[in-house]
Image (cartoon, rainbow, N blue to C red):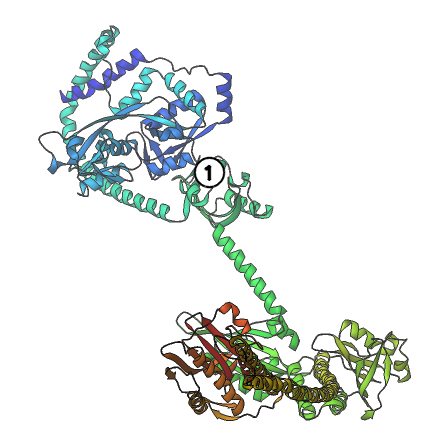
Amino acid sequence: MPMLRGLARPILLLAVCLLQALPAQAQSLSAEQQRWLGQHPEIRVGATEMPTLLMRDFRSGSYSGLAVDLLKLYEKRLGIRFQLVYYGSLEDMHEGIRNREVDLLFAAVATPGRELYLTFPKPYAELDTKIIVRRDNVSITPLSLDRMSGRSIAVLAASALEERLRREYPDLHLVPARDELSALTKLAFGEVDAAVTDLNRVTYYVQKEGLSNLAVGGDTGISYPYTFAVRSDWPELATLLNLADASLPPAERNQVMERWMQLDQARPWNNPRFWWVAGGLLALLALALGTMLLWNRVLRREVASRTAQLDAQMAELVAVDRDLRESEARFRDLAELSYDWYWEQDENFRFTQMSGGAFQKGRLPVEVYMGKTRWELPLLGVSLEEITAHRALVEAHQPYREFIYQFRTQDGELHWYMANGRPVFAEDGRFRGYRGTGQDITERMLTQQALVDSEQRIRGLLDSTFSFVGLLDPQGTVLEVNRTALDFIGQEKAEVVGKPLWDTAWWAHDEGAREDLRQALARARQGEAVRFATSHRSALGVLHWMDVSISPVKDAAGRVVYLVREGRDVTEMRRTQEALRALVENTAAVYGERFLNSLVQHVATLFDVDYAFVGILEPDGTSVRSLASWSHGAPAENFSYTLANTPCQTLLQGGPCLYPRGVADLFPADAMLRQMALESYMGTPITGSNGKPLGVLVVLDTKPLAESTDYLPILSLFALRAGMEIERMSQEHTMRTLNQELERRVTERTLQLEAANKELESFSYSVSHDLRAPLRHIAGFVSLLKDDEANQLSPDSLRYLSIITDSANRMSDLIDGLLTFSRIGRAAVQKTPVDLSRLLREVIEELAHEPCAPVVSWDIAELPQVQADRTLMRQVLGNLVGNALKYSRRRERAEIRISASPIDYQGRPEWAIRISDNGVGFNMKYVGKLFGVFQRLHGATEFEGTGIGLANVRRIVERHGGRIWAEGTPDLGATFTFTLPRDE
C-alpha cells in the first residue's frame, strides 16, 4: 500500500494535465510594446540566494527556483533574454538596481521607500513568516512577536520584513544578517534567541545544512506577496511582465508552483471527465501493481544494500557540500574585501556577468559592458596594435594578465582599469568562455605618472644647476650623476655609473685628492656630513677649484643607505677673493688721489693690460675727466674724454661691458681708440650710494683680452670701492667748503654780538643813571615837603605823598629787576660742582630772617650735586623758595616740600627738582604768564614783588640746559619744577 500511495499522486497530476492543458499563447502586444522589446532584447536581472525563489549552484554557475522558472516562461512569450547578475547580499542587489547595473530584481516586497526607485508588477507568490527557535527553547504555548520583547531576533538585512518589524515592534532587539543562512546559523549556534523568516527557506536550509536543532516556535501573522521589481524609469517592462504572466496557462503555472511551493491543487474529481480517465488508469494501475508486488521482494534486499551505499555517499556529499559552502563564503568575503570585481564572458567573448562591486569599486558602467566584447567597447589609452594583439591572445584561448586600458565613466571621469582573464573549458574540452577579475587602478596610474613627472622635474632641475650633483651607495659607487658634472669631464653617464667615485675622471689628476675623498666617504658612511675643498681638471685641461660636500641619506632605522655628493665650482669666487685681498692690502691705508692711483695700478696688473683709468662724469654729462690714469706700467697724466659714440657712453647707458677684441672697429668714431691702436676694452660704471652714475673704471689693451665670466664682476667690485672713495672725496671737499663758510659766519656773528653787548651795556648804564636821578629827585622833594613844618598838609595830602614815595620806590625796584634780567642774559655761566642741599640750607637760613616769614613745616629730601653756576643757582633757589614762603604766609602753618629725582627727557638724563607749597596757588589757565617779564597773577596790595623774578629763574635754568614748569590749584598750593643736566 505505501507503493500505491506513492503512485497515486503522479497519476492524479497526469490526469490534471490531461484535463487542463491548453496551448500556451502569448497575448497580442501593441506595436509600441513590440518596438520597446526590440530595443531591449536582453534584460539584466539582479539575483541573490533566496530559497525557494532562487538558488545558485556555484560549481556550475546555474540557477534554479520559482522566479527562474517563471522568467524562462516569460522569455518564450516575450521573445527576450533575461541575464542573471548575482549579488552577495540583498543590500548589494538593491544598490545595484539603484545604480542601474541591473534592470529587474527577481524578488522584492513593495514598500514606500522602494517605490522611489522601483515599479512592481503583480505578485507571483505569497509567503508566510514564522518565528524559528532552537528545539530546546520550544514552549508549550506558541510564540508571537508580542511575547518576544527584549529578545535578540535575527532577520534578513535591508528586507521589507526588517523594516516592518522595526516600525511595528520597536521593543524587539533585531540582529540584521547578510542572508537567511547566516540568520539561521546564528540561531543554531546560540548567538540570537530566534529568527524570523518564511517556512520555505527554513525547510530548505534545515535539510541542506543539517540544522536539525531548529523548529517553528510560532507564527508572526505577517505574510508578504513577492513580485518582480522593475527599475522605476522602465514602467513598460512592468506592463509586459504582467501581460506575460496573464498569458500563462493555469496548468503550466500550477506545475511551477507545485514544484517549488507544494501548493494544493483544485480537486480534479469535481470534473466529470475525471472518472472516465481515472477508470482506465486504475485498470492499468491494477495490472502494474501485480507486477510490482512480484518484484517487491526481489528488490527489497537490493534496496537495503543500495540504501546503505547511498547513506555513505550522502554523508560524503554533505561534507563536500559543507566544504563548498565554506569555500563559497571565503570566496565571497575575499571578493568583497578586495579591490577587484568578478566578470564572465561566454564562448563569443561577450560579457555575461559582472559582480556588483564593479560599480562601487570602479564606477564601471556595467550596462555598457553587458553583451559586448572588450574590443567592441570605446576603450581609451590603448593603441590599435595593442587591442589587436589582445584579441588574438583571447581568440587563441590563452590566459592573460594586466591588460590595462582607459574608460570614461558615466559622470565623465576618465578611469584606468586592469583586467586579468583565464579561459574556461567544459569537461569535454569545449571552450565555454572567459572568467576573470577587474580592478580600478586610476589612483595607481596617476601616482605612477606623478612619480614620472616628478622624476623628470628633478632630473631637469639637477641638470640645469651649475653644481656637480651625484648619488652614491654607502661604499662610494656612482649611481646617478647630473649633466653639469658629465659635461665638465666630457663623458657620458654610462662611463661613470657603477665605478667608485675616486676612479672617475674628476679625481684622476691628483692622488692626494683621491685620498681626501676616501676619508670623506668613510666619515659620511658613519652618518657625518662632510665638506672639504679640492680641485678638478676639466676636459680642456683647465684646473678648477671645487667646494665638495658629501651628505648621508638614512632610512627609518637610521642606517645610511645613500650618499649625496655635491660640488660647486668656486674658481671665480676664489679669484675674486684674491683680487679683493690684494685691493684691501694695497689700498686700505691710502685715501683720495693716492687711493685712485693705487687702484688703477692694481687693476692694470690684475688684468695684465697696458692702460687703466678712473674717470669722473662732468656735470654736463657729455664728457669724462680722468682722476687717475695708468699707462705701460707707470702713472699717466689725466685727460678729458668726450663720450659721444664711445664704449664709455655704452656702459654708462647699459652697464658693464667687455669687448675682448676689435673694439676700434666696433666704435669707428672714437678717435682715441684708433690713435692708441687699442684692440680690447672692458669697463664698468662707477655709481654713487643713490644709484646715479659718478664716472667709469676702464681697462684697455693693444692685445685681445681673455673671455672670462669673472672679469666683469671683479672690475665691478673695484668700481664699487672707487665710487665710495669718490663720494668720500666729494663729501670731504663739501665739508671743507662748509667749514670755511661757517667760520666766516661765526666771525661775523661774534662781531655783531660784541657790538650788541656794548650797546646793551650802554643802555643799562643809561637806565641806571638817567632813570634813577628823577626818581631820587621825586623821593627827595616829597621827603622835604613832609618835613616842612610850616606847610600845613591835610591827611589826604599826606596819604598822596606816601603813594608817590611808594611808587617811586617800586619804580626803582623795577629798574633793578630789569637790570638784573639783562645782566643774567649777558653774564657768562661759570659751571662748577654745586651741592644743592648745602646751597638750599644757606638760602633757607637767609630767608628765615625776612620780616613776615610764616611758621613753616619743612619737608626736604636729599638734593644732588650738579654742574652749575653757584651764584645763579642761589638766585633760582632763593626766588622759588621765597615765593613759596610769600604765598603761604596766610596759612597758620606753611608746608613746603623740596625733593629731587632722576629722569630722562628725549634720551637725555636730567635731575628734576620740585618745590611745593600749600599757599594760595593759581589757576592753570594763566600758567603761560608766570614766567613773563612784569607778569603777575596777584596784585601788589596782596603780595609784594616786581614780576621779574620767575623770568630770571627761567632764563638761568635754560642757560644751564634745563627746563622749568609750574602746576597749581587755587587755594591748594603750587609746585614749581626745574631740571638740570645729570652727569652719568
Q: Quadrant of residue 726?
A: bottom right
Q: Position of residue 826 (x, y in %)?
A: 63, 88
> Is residue 880 placed above or below 93 in the rendered structure?
below
User: Looking at the picture, does residue 82 appear above or below residue 515?
Assistant: above
Q: Is residue 406 visible?
A: yes
In this rendered view, identify the residue nearer to me: 443 or 256. 443
Q: Position of residue 464 (x, y in %)?
A: 63, 68
Secondary structure of residue under mark 1: helix
Q: Quadrant of the N terminus?
A: top left
Q: How many marks?
A: 1
Relative to 656, say whether 261 is above or below.
above
Which quadrant holds residue 707?
bottom right
Taking depth in this image into account, of 157 and 64 the one nearest to the observer is 157
Tell me the residue that label 1 is attached to: 366
Query: Is any part of residue 632 visible from this angle?
Result: no
Name the outermost residue toward the front.
Answer: 790
Q: For label 1, count other residues whose C-alpha is less than 10 Å away and answer few (under 14), some (14-19) or many (20+).
A: some
Q: Position of residue 163 (x, y in %)?
A: 29, 33
Q: What percent of the width, then of the height, locates residue 714? A: 70, 82
Viewer-proximal residue, 917 or 562? 917
The kind of residue tagged 1 is Val
Q: Residue at x 21, y 19 (%)?
A: 9
Q: Is residue 921 left or right of residue 282?
A: right
Q: Is residue 490 left or right of residue 744?
A: left
In depth, the one of 702 and 62 nearer the eye is 702
- Quarter assignment of residue 434: top left
Which residue extends farthest top? Answer: 272
Q: Is residue 716 above or below residue 78?
A: below
Residue pictured at 44% horizontal, 28% vertical: 81
